[in-house]
Each structure stands twice: as structure tokens, then as C-alpha cells.
Amino acid sequence: METVVITPPGRLGLPRWSELWGAREVLYRFGQRDVLLRYRQTAVGVVWVVLQPLAAAGVFSLVFGTVANLPSDGVPYFLFSYAGMLAWNLFNQTVGRAAPSLVSNQALVSKVFFPRLLVPLSTALSVLLDFAVALALGAVLLLVYGVNPGWAVLLLPVWTVLLLGVALGIGLAAASVQVKYRDIGYALPWALQLLLYASPVAYSVQAVEGLSPAVRLLFEANPMTWFLDAFRFSVLGLDAPPAWQVAGMVGVSALVLLAGVLVFQKNERNFADVI
């Protein structure tokens, strides 16, 4: 008979990857439950996934494209906004669902042993399903508008994985901190809302070219700007991101994910005591 010895994680130690792999069924079950609970007893089900980016793209097109008359890099403003919402929703929903995941499952966290890291990680499964549905509608919109992104679409999975890494890193750290400080549940949505308007989701970077160098530097130093440009490159066939941005995306994704895992591991020792 195999003996399993349960020991607390180290304060700055990485998780036991073999343990996570052995419990991968838990990851799948949590993700499956998240999808079923969200769409159970809804009249239109998964249609809600595409209504949000469609409505947001429509409002942004009206406000920024028609009223403010901002540039959209030569593509229809609605399509430009929709491509930005694809990237933003992937990031925003991953962080937003991962952060409260431990508190929402406090009964399991405090009474049943399994790798706690799997709880916030599992939220990415339902987000990726929503992303796939919204992306399929995006492909239809490309046909309607007659836009051909070309070979750049092959790089979309790369940008998706890198952006998901950033979102999960933030979500892991937020989830572990929210177990003790519920203020995260109030502060995080507010911070994400500010980041939405501080990032070129609904407008092009060209719109800030006439501003002061300091303001332009802030936009160019924002990693979300890099990811949004990369997504629009792959979805709309716009200009390719420079090499430094690609390197920056890889570095930021790896560093934020690693930092999120380390923060989670450090705080996990006290989950059962404070949740």
C-alpha cells in the first residue's frame, strides 16, 4: 500500500508538479462545474458569452469611433473594438474569476486535501471556452467585413497563452491574499476598470501620438498595450509588434506567473486557519 505524507508547502517553494499532475482530474471537474453552474437555468445559455463583447464593441464604436472620431488603424471601428475586447475579456475574466475562487470554495479548501493551486487555475478552463466562442464569432465578423488577417492568425495561440499566464499570475496572488483580506474583492474590480480605460482596448495607440512624450511612454510601457497590438496583428492583420514587445510579453508573462505561484505558495500555509 502506498503511503502519502502530507507536508506544508515551503514559504518560497514551488509546487510539487507531480502532485498537480496526479490531481488533474480535480482541475477538470472544477472547470466543468464552473461552466455548468454559470449557464444553468439561463434562457439563452452560451449566447451571453458573445453579447458582452458585441455590446461593448458597439458602444466603443459609437463613442470613440463616431463621436470622438478616433483612428482605428484603417479597419472598421466595430471590428477594431471587438478584437480588443477579445484580448481584454480573456485577461479580465481570468483575473476576475480566479481571485474569489478560494473563498467561494472555502468548505472544500478547509476540509478536503487536494492541491489548492488547482482551484484558481481551473477558472481558466471556462474562460477559454468563452474565448473560443467569442473568437468563432470574430471569424464570422472577419468574413462579413472582408478582412483577411493572413498568416499572422497562426500566432494567436502564442499571444493567448502569454496573456493567460499574466492573468493567472495576478489571479493566483489575488486569490491567496483574498482568503485573509476580503478587501481584494472590492479593490480588484475597480483596478481592472481603471486598467480598461488606461489600455488601448477601445482606441488605437495612434490616438495618443499627439500627447506629451511622458504620456506616450506610459502607454507604451503598459504590457496590455503590447498584448492588444499583438492580438490585433493576428486577428486583423495590422502591423506586427516590434521585437522588443514580443520579448517583453514573454518576460512579463513568465515573471508574473512565477510571482503569482510563489505568493500563493507562501500564503497557502494559512488558508485553513483564516478562511
Image (tube, rainbow, N blue to C red):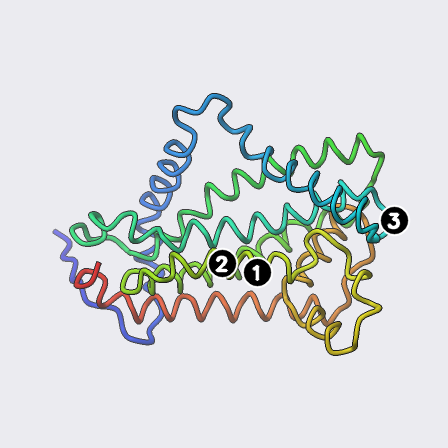
Residue placed at 59% from the left, 33% from the top? 51
Q: Are marks 2 and 1 in contact (CB under 8 Å)?
A: yes
Lower position in the chain sequence, tag 2 or tag 3 = 3
Q: Where does residue 193 sit, x and y in percent of width and height?
A: 55, 56
Residue placed at 38% from the left, 56% from the top? 185
Alpha carbons under labels 2 and 1: distance apart = 6 Å
Which of 255/42 is in front?
42
Which secondary structure, mark 2? helix
**Left or right of 47: which side holds 115?**
left
Task: Give the number of the mark in front: 2 or 3.
Answer: 2
Which of 98/11 is in front?
98
Lower position in the chain sequence, tag 3 or tag 1 = 3
Residue 272 found in image quarter: bottom left
Alpha carbons under labels 2 and 3: distance apart = 32 Å
Q: Which residue is mark 2?
A: 190
Residue placed at 33% from the left, 43% from the top? 25
Task: Give the number of the mark in front: 3 or 1.
Answer: 1
Q: Which mark is residue 74?
A: 3
Q: Residue furthest right?
A: 74
**Left or right of 266: which side holds 153?**
right
Residue 180 found in image quarter: bottom left
Which secondary structure, mark 1? helix
Residue 229 found in image quarter: bottom right
Q: Which mark is residue 194?
A: 1
Which secondary structure, mark 3? loop
Alpha carbons under labels 3 and 1: distance apart = 27 Å
Residue placed at 35% from the left, 62% from the top? 183
Residue 206, relative to residue 72: is it above or below?
below
Amino acid type, mark 3 = Gly
